[in-house]
Image (cartoon, helix red, strand yellow):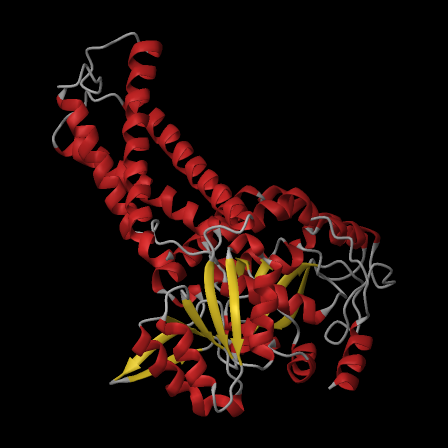
Amino acid sequence: MIKKHQRLINQFNALLDAVVLLLSYLFSSWFWLDIIRHSRKNMAYVSGITSSTLYAALIFAAWTVFLLWLLRVYRTSRTRPTGPQIGRILAGNTVALLMAASALYLFRLQDFSRGVLLVYFIVSNLLLVVKKLVTWKVLRYIRSRGHNLKHMIVVGGGEMAQRYVASVEKRPLLGIQVDECIKPDQEMLEKLENRLHGAGIDEVIMALEPDELGMVMDVIRVCEKCGTKLCVIPFYNDVIPTRPTIDTIGRLKLIQLRTTPMDEPINAFVKRGFDFVASLLLLILLSPLFLILAIAIKLSSPGPVFFRQERIGLNKKPFIMYKFRSMKVNDEQDTAWSSQKDDRRTWLGALLRKTSLDELPQLFNTLKGDMSIVGPRPEIPYFVEQFRETVPLYMVKYQVRPGITGWAQVNGYRGDTSIPARVEHDLWYIENWTFWLDIKILLMTVFGGMINNETLQKPAEEQLVSQKTDA
């Protein structure tokens, strides 16, 4: 039933967006040229139903909707978050407007009002996003009332099947209803085929355990015979990233379990380009502060201005990381973390640590390419060797450049805090990276994340002992 009407709903949604875009332009033309500028002679003004500008606006609205369609804005999914969809809407509308502006320049239509384009850009984006959010809220409300449900059958009786059912039951707003769980037995295929022959089942979820994999092809055959969509929850679900990559060699499919968005050349270029430009500008702008801190450190205690320490970076390669020295020179710098009450700190070092100003020299590391501005924090080799044996998935974070700040740090995991929790946050960041996520983390760092409270959960040595015991 859902599948029957989905295409019609998507087409109506696209048509509604075209109407929104057209109305946005009509409003922008009236608001800027009638209300603000009091001028109707500009070619951007829509003079009536036969106006050539109106026809151009219709074509532009259709072109924008086509771009949004290419960006899969109208591809519906109950389980995907709304944020990426909104990002695609903004991206598609921006590209369409830039292309329109380029066409105006190409055809030497310089008199076309830039004010109208600016107002249109703001209004259209606002209306498209509001429409998307309202639609999303309405659909979730309808589904929570027991309507517009997607009916599922789960094949499997193990842990993965139970986890799927429990996850769906906790999220009624998704509008997913599990009609039946069919456990693997001798009558399973017959039960499944009988249920799928009639109408009412939209999808089958196959969640078989390792000892049940002999039934996989039979389940696939039944679903294809009945024309029912099939989704698979593999038994190795917990090690699959959010966005796995599938390569092909001949007719073989290779699932890359540890690919990241930063493996894409464009994403890597954007991230590295931002790191280089931002670190260079910050080093220039902060050079007076660097000089003041260097003099203050020299006066506060004997020793060098910069603290140099070997850390592990991208692809497990060691590099020398720089910080402003916050401690007295000591013999434990390569085997122990600092804490809030560390007696090795100088009075100035405590202030630098509190405000995270001691991290600023890592801009040099970022400029060199050893680090990124945002990413998982690097560790010293001593702890890397310890945690790689005791913390699951710990070494995965070294597939990307370490950062000056990161998702774990802005969520409170810095210093002597839970290593598994920190790794969990780092992996989430790696799998869900976007340029805008980096911007968000930077804003969180500036507005609160630079103050270092160093909440102690477990000293590093105690974490190592407990993890070895648990292992």
Picture coordinates of residue 404 (x, y %)? Answer: 60, 58
Residue at screen point 78% across, 57% down: 454
**Is 344 above or below relative to 437?**
below
Picture coordinates of residue 348 (x, y %)? Answer: 79, 51
Q: Pick whichever, 72 or 467, lies toward us.
A: 72
Is residue 400 visible from the viewing direction of this image?
yes
Q: Is residue 144 left or right of residue 449?
A: left
**Is 222 above or below relative to 404?**
below
Residue lying farthest to the top in this orientation: 38
Picture coordinates of residue 415 (x, y %)? Answer: 74, 63
Q: Pick whichever, 75 or 431, lies toward us.
A: 75
Q: Pick whichever, 362 or 464, lies toward us.
A: 464
Q: Pick whichever, 36 or 85, lies toward us.
A: 85
Q: Is residue 310 left or right of residue 315?
A: right
Q: Is residue 305 left or right of residue 189?
A: right
Picture coordinates of residue 185 (x, y %)? Answer: 51, 89
Is residue 317 visible from the viewing direction of this image?
no
